[in-house]
Amino acid sequence: MPQITDLNVAPYYDDFDKEDNFHRVLFRPGFAIQARELTQLQSIMQNQIERFGRHMFQEGSVVIPGQVTYAKLVTNVQLSSTFAGETIVPSQYYNATNPVIITGATSGMQAKVIGFQEGTATTQPLLIVQYLNSGSDNATESFADSENISADISITHNTTYGSAIASATTHSTDAAQVGSSVKVEEGVYFIRGQFVRCAEQTLLLSANSTTESARVGFTVTEELITPETDASLTDNAQGSSNYAAKGAHRLKINLTLSKKDEGATDDTDFVELVTVKRGQTTANKSDITKYSVIGDTLARRTFDESGDYTTRPFQFDIRESIDNSVKTKEFDGVYTRGSTTDDGGTASEDKLVVAVTPGKAFVRGYEIEKTAITFKDLQKAREVETINAGVTNLDLGNFTLITNVFGTPDVGEVSGETTAYKQIKLFESPTVTRGSTTGMGRNFGIARARAFEYSQGVIGDVQAEHKIFLFDIQMFTRLELSDTPSPLLTATHTTGVRVKGNTSGAIGFVFSTEANDAGTAATIVNLVNTSGTFQVGEKLIASDSALTGGLIEISGGDGSTDITVVTVENFKFENVKAMFMDDDDSGQDFTADLVEARVDFGILRQEDALTGGGIRLEDTTGGEFLELETEGLAKIRDPEKNAALFRLPKQVIKTLLTDDNDNTSDSQIIIRRQFVGTTRHYLQMITITQVTHKS
């Protein structure tokens, strides 16, 4: 904003109006120069400077840095208001160029005076000091109460006191204090359209507190200086001031370092430089120059090319608003109960505080920097809504799609049978005879089914697809041995013998054995829960072997020939083509083929004819084809859903126990259950008996 002082009054009559668009005052010979014209000439020039300045700088921006610093620990000493019946003049002890040294008569403390503050009706005059020693006893840390002090220069109140002569007395109580202050160095600021110089100044925020909160800045005052108050404005054409020849008046702008309460909003005569909250600077507006229109242009370009980003990311921490305890655990609060928060709220146990660490970001191209922790209020959840008979779905995953289904897998306990969740064998080839393993090839692994449901297609048709939810999937590591072991690996335990590679250190557990293609018994070993990689040609150690070193030897030999590994195969679920479950009851076996997902390997191969499948590129002249190789693989879908955990109906649940349910959980779980029955051909029906009280 422009200057506040109105100069369109007597005796100046500066009637400059920017709406007139006057840009020059043109003087003419033979016509007297008016004082108004000379004043208006300055106003025209100042208006141009102000317009340029507002294009470049924001109001209150630092132009030539006058650094602002906050001192949290400032030592000071209170003085008695009078000495020897005379009013104390604390400014006598301050000299910015040659600091005054004061000495305590009792304590022997010496200190350098770096500032002062006049006394008021409610406060004592005081000196801001830096201690230079530790007193006469080398232990004292500050001036004593009610002790005389002397200076190393002459001090004048009404009477002049010589150097090293007592000239003041410290206050009777709490003379030595520790407070906080803000200091601004000499600099230039853009204020009210003018480039205004500020002198070096120190403001004592508090004489006895290091956790003060305030807005610190310049109080801007305008005053008219006349020759009557400033003799330097008289005519000095003869080399000295002529008191009879008074000159023109001057408009002076003063910047005085001062403070306002945090909540103060009247900034008509105030330019904020720094904000201090509880002894920490949270915003320092004098750190960098705040540019105006040119700053907006730079910000727009920065945002267009880089967007929003952080250079020092902010971190977040949730804290209690006030001291609180939960189940004997104590939590420290940021505020005291009932105090005003940084967000303008009232601190209470119903609030949380989000603490945002210092950081730096560019938002819409503008630099945003926080140099201290910022606290934001967050209301705790206190409203409760009671939901009766809320419903949630239990979504079990880990399923694969199957087709050509014959029978159903056991997905739970079946009456009359001892094994729930029977094992399902996984094979390498599709079903040849439904309900039989004939033609399915090798057994690649085992699994169990927890659920079975229809997916798509015509129900009852062999092409219909179903979902089978698998768990306990164990794929085999298949070892072919050099001969039949002695004793057999299943001689002592049907399954579970631990086998270890003598060289590789790989470990697996025997699931089953079988003959090899040549018919040699027990030379194929299927292992589960394998860790490590078995090597061809290495010997094997069995956990139940009584032989030296636990090595497995050839059956029928003389005990000197050890078994070795001939081949090693590690099977994967993706290679499985079919599955089979052997049921205790005749005619209730389960078979199905897996629905394969097509996988593109990105390999082009040249073929003389179409081989089927894949993507083909035909060469019409040569009769050859390029075919992109693809393969169908079995796939476990939703593998992350492998635990029977489920969400409650709402994101946040306070409790399942309420007065409405007598503080007793009454949750109900609805599940699917498998029943086995036989239809009678003449009734085409089965009877299912409800089973109750199952846990």
Image (cartoon, rainbow, N blue to C red):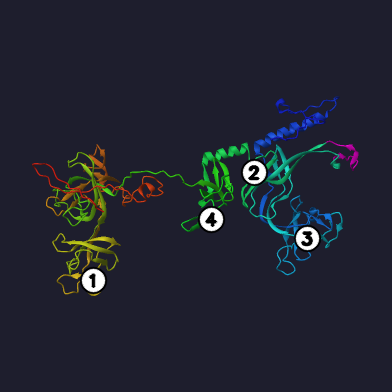
- Say what amino acid the circle numbered 4 marks: Asp
Which mark is first along the chain, 3 or 1? Answer: 3
Q: Which residues are magenta?
A: 233-248
Q: Earlier in the sequence, mark 1 or mark 2?
A: 2
The amino acid beneath tag 2 is Thr
Please tell me whether residue 245 belongs to the stretch shown in magenta.
yes
Q: Secondary structure at mark 4?
A: loop
Mark 1, other Cα within 10 Å: few <14 / some 14–19 / many ≥20: many
Q: Which residue is labeled 4 in the image? A: 332
Sooner in the amino-acid sequence: mark 4 or mark 2: 2
**Percent of width and height locating residue 106:** 77, 66
- Quarter of the rendering containing residue 97: bottom right
Q: In the depicted view, which residue is nearer to us: 394 or 534? A: 394
One can see residue 273 in this view: yes
C-alpha distance separating marks 1 and 2:
82 Å
Whether residues under marks 4 and 1 lie with C-beta atoms below 8 angstroms apart, the answer is no
Amino acid type, mark 3: Ile
Rendered position, 108 above or below 178: below
The disc, 4 or 1, on the residue closer to the chain's N-terminal end is 4
Gap between marks 3 and 2 measured at Cα: 38 Å
The picture places residue 382, in percent across and down from the top left corner, at 46, 46
Q: Quadrant of residue 36?
A: top right
Foreground disc of the pair 3, 2: 3
Give the position of the C terminus as an image quadrant: bottom left
- Looking at the image, residue 271 sits to the left or right of residue 473; the answer is right
Q: Which circle, 4 or 2, is nearer the viewer?
A: 4
Residue 289 numbered tag: 2
Q: Nearer the viewer, mark 1 or mark 2?
A: 2
Kindly identify which residue carries mark 1: 551
Contact check, label 3 and label 2, Cβ < 8 Å: no
